[in-house]
Image (spheres, rainbow, N blue to C red):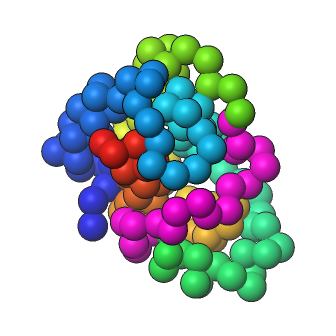
Amino acid sequence: MKSLFDDVVYREVIERLGKLKADTPSQWGKMDASSMVKHCDLVLSSSLGPAPRKRALMSYLFRKVAKKQYVYRSVYKKNGYTAPNFIVTKGGDLVANREALTKKIDQFRKAGEKEYDNRLHAFFGRLTVEEWGMLQYNHINHHLTQFGI
């Protein structure tokens, strides 16, 4: 499985992000390119702050199935559920959003094993550093694929 902690995968993601243009059409969904990059930034940002103290109630019911779908599969369903706090309707400037996302990816990678091994995720519970890297890669990959990149 691909992980954002892998140097080759990191370079691939950055290169793919660089190919994204403001007018790149979405193959599904409601976001434009800039909104998608901002959305990915918000999702990654949520894992950069302090770890949550507890898991979401729904995670106790659906964690195992969801973990298989989102951590261990690199292909997500099109038009899937998005938590309300991660919905972006106005993305703004694509270049600025891409720079912000790249900085967040760099922060995530720099923190690495020190911060992410056995760290609590609000929905998936405790994840290994490998699972964190796969989860973040899979999410960004899903959205780059959404734009044919």
Seen at 50% across and 75% down, the residue is 69
Q: Position of residue 123 (x, y in %)?
A: 68, 67
Residue 73 versus residue 103 in the image, above or below: below
Seen at 48% across and 79% down, the residue is 68
Seen at 63% across and 70% down, the residue is 125
Q: Position of residue 39 (x, y in %)?
A: 60, 38
**Which of the two residues, 19 or 45, is positioned nearer the viewer here?**
19
Which quarter of the rendered picture does the C terminus lie within?
Answer: top left
Q: Position of residue 52 (x, y in %)?
A: 72, 54
Is residue 135 visible in the rendered structure shown here?
yes
Which quarter of the rendered picture does the N terminus lie within?
Answer: bottom left
Extreme-right residue of the structure: 57
Is residue 140 visible in the rendered structure shown here?
no
Residue 121 versus residue 13 in the image, above or below: below
**With 32 as the anchor, is 107 left or right in this view?**
left
Q: Position of residue 67 (x, y in %)?
A: 53, 75
**What secondary structure characterizes most of the magenta part?**
loop
**With 33 as the anchor, is 35 left or right in this view?**
right
Report the label total.
0
Seen at 61% across and 18% down, the residue is 92
**With 122 as the anchor, is 98 left or right in this view?**
left
Boundaries of the magenta span: 71-88
Extreme-left residue of the structure: 8
Q: Is residue 59 magenta?
A: no
